[in-house]
Each structure stands twice: as structure tokens, then as C-alpha cells.
Image (cartoon, rainbow, N blue to C red):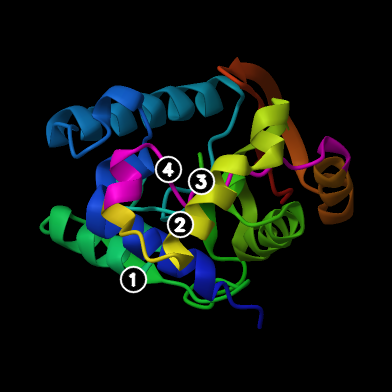
Amino acid sequence: MQRFGSSSRDWDELASMDPLWAVLTLNDKRGNRWDIEEFWETGRDQVDATMGLLERLGWNGARELAVDFGCGVGRMSRALSPYFDRTVGVDISNKMVELARDLNAGVSGLEFERIDGATIDAIQSGTVDMVHTILVLQHLPNATQAIGYLHEFERILRPGGVLVFDIITETRWTYRLRARRRLYRILRVAGVAPERLHAKGLTSMTMTSVPVQDVDDFIRESGLEVLLIDDQQKGSFSKRFYYLRKPG
């Protein structure tokens, strides 16, 4: 099993310093400026829109189990929970999972699990009605790992289940250079505290694009049905949102 120790440590660090901003990185919210209710509302708005879109696309599958991959503190998991009998948020960060459990204590049908590696061992094959992962695959170290997880999502989906995810398809050249992340690493090795770097706008966060052809190949190999592909421009990034259904 491939493990992502460095990534999990990075996210543990961010969770300790500024967890809500790490999940939804709006510039004016950096430095623990998120209001928690406003933060939850962003998740509800997005999930409500997604569920409405899926209904218009004709999806009427079972609502027993949803998996929110890269759940962070549970922004999307919490919003998904009213729609499903059981919602499981999974994340590679111990600290994020701990915070998710604390912040969502008492929410019915909602649980959180840590994963360690390229598989989601906590979830059995063919049991999930929705796999949902937004603003997550772009933070994996490379595109190969993102595609690997797509295959894992297909494994856990039951026939009739849906997969909802987004990728960055193109970034501006300054992001591709990753100069700020390299500077962050150099200064951390030199002993500069992460809190000081975070205050200066430097972060360990990775931004990774995924070739569209690689996703097209995954869709063809997996046999998933395309309900919708939606291209959007988000600031400096070109993004693509996928809504896929497992036949059956």
C-alpha cells in the first residue's frame, strides 16, 4: 500500500493552525477568521445545489450510504448527512478527523474515519450510493495518485451509485513553478515556525492539475456513465466537474 506520510503531516499542521481556512481557502478568512455557521452554510449551499442537479439529471438511486473523500473538518459531510441514512467522511489527516468528530458531535448518521494509503479500507466494495470529493484531488501530490483514487471510488460504488468530483485541468504558470511551496519547504528546514510562515501567506498546500485524457481513460476503463461534465473557470484555475453513474 502506498502511504502519504508527508501529506498527512502537512494537513495535520494546517489543521492545528487554521483548520477552516485550510478546507475553504478564502483570502479574507485566513487566520481563523471563518465564522463556523457561515462555514457550514457554504457546504449546505453546495450540496443542495449538487443534489438538485443530480435529480434534474435523472439520478434517483438509493440513499443509504455516502462517502465524502477528503472531508477535512466535515464541511461537505455534514451537508450530505440529511440526504443519506449514513454518511462517512474520510481523510488522511488525524487532526482533521479529530476536529470533524468534535465539531459534528451529535449530528445523526455522520461518522469520520482516517485513511492511510491509496485505498479506502474502511469501506467495502459495492456498498456506496454516492462518493463525493470536491476541492480535494487538486491537493494530492501528483495526478497518478488522483487517478488511483478514482479507481478506488469506482470500487466502492454500488450499481446505480454516483461519483461527484472535480479536478484542476490547467493552472497559471506561476502555480506550476511551485516557487512559494519550495520556499516554504526551505524555510521550514531552516527552522522557521509554520505559524510564522502561514501568517506571511506561505503554505505547504499543493495544487495539482490532472490531465483530462487520464480521466477520460479512467471513465472508459471503469465503464461509468457520464451524467454531466461541467467546465468552469475559478480564478487562476480551469476546473472540470464530473457527475458519473455506475451502471446497474
Secondary structure category for the residue under label 1: helix
Out of 185 and 40, give the one closest to the viewer.
185
Marks 2 and 4 in Cβ contact (< 8 Å): yes
Marks 3 and 4 in Cβ contact (< 8 Å): no
Figure check: 207 above or below 143: above
Q: CA distance from mark 1 to mark 2?
A: 25 Å
Secondary structure category for the residue under label 3: strand
Crowdedness near tag 2: few (<14), some (14–19) or many (≥20) residues, C-alpha within 10 Å: some
Q: Is residue 198 left or right of residue 154?
A: left
Read off the magenta span. Answer: 196-213
N-term-proximal mark, 3 vs 2: 3
- How far across and down, in percent of the image, does residue 125 sit? 61, 71
User: Between tags 1 and 2, which lies in front?
Assistant: 2
Q: Residue at x 28, y 41 (%)?
A: 199
Asked whether residue 230 is in view, the answer is: yes
Q: Is residue 123 magenta?
A: no
Tell me the residue that label 1 is attached to: 94
N-term-proximal mark, 2 vs 4: 2
Tell me the residue that label 4 is attached to: 202
Q: Residue at x 23, y 35 (%)?
A: 40
Crowdedness near tag 1: few (<14), some (14–19) or many (≥20) residues, C-alpha within 10 Å: some
